[in-house]
């Protein structure tokens, strides 16, 4: 199972969503905060707490439960998806 912490208005999150769709992978989306260079307004306290528990307050953030991996950053997430889901 994949969980993507992201924001609809974030181009980096969009890049990850496009790759997930390209590979036909199912995933759960969490929208912890609005996009912003310094972190946008928190829109969901619970999922924001889960996001920062991973060690950073950065979106996108992927939790890959099946591979016991968490990944921050769109390029690193796309690389992970290409290695495991292509």
Image (cartoon, rainbow, N blue to C red):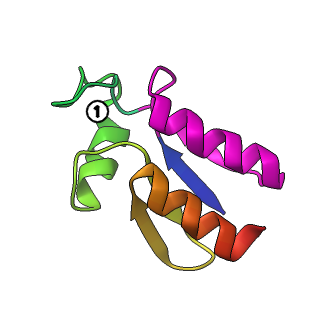
Which quadrant of the figure has residue 81?
Answer: bottom right
Q: Residue at x 53, y 48 (%)?
A: 4
Residue 2 makes an appearance in the image: yes
Quadrant occupied by the C terminus: bottom right
Residue at 47 percent across and 74 percent down: it is: 69
Q: Is residue 77 left or right of residue 53?
A: right
10 in magenta: yes
Mark 1, Cα crowd under 10 Å, few <14 / some 14-19 / many 20+, is few
Can residue 62 be seen at all in this image of the molecule? no
Q: Position of residue 3 (x, y in %)?
A: 56, 53
Left or right: 64, with 86 as reference point: left
Q: Residue furthest left?
A: 38
Against 53, is 40 above or below?
A: above
Foreground residue among 39 and 74: 74
Q: Which residues are magenta?
A: 6-31
In the image, taking residue 18 as reference, residue 43 lies left or right, namely: left
> Is residue 37 found inside the magenta-colored segment of the image?
no
Provide residue 73's location: percent of width, then percent of height: 39, 53
Q: Is residue 48 above or below residue 41?
A: below
Q: Residue at x 46, y 50 (%)?
A: 74
Q: Is residue 70 above or below residue 10?
A: below
> Where does label 1 land, which residue?
45
Q: Secondary structure at mark 1?
A: helix
> Could you tell me residue 70's position as x and y percent?
43, 67
Q: Quadrant of residue 60?
A: top left
Quadrant assignment for the N terminus: bottom right
Q: Position of residue 84 (x, y in %)?
A: 69, 75
């Amino acid at each position: 199972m994949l969980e993507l912490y992201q924001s609809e208005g974030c181009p980096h999150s969009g890049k990850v969503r496009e790759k997930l769709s390209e590979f036909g992978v199912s995933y759960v989306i969490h929208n912890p905060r609005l996009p912003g260079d310094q972190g946008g307004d928190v829109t969901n306290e619970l999922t924001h707490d889960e996001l920062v528990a991973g060690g950073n307050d950065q979106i996108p953030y992927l939790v890959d439960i099946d591979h016991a991996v968490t990944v921050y950053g769109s390029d690193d997430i796309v690389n992970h998806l290409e290695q495991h889901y292509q």
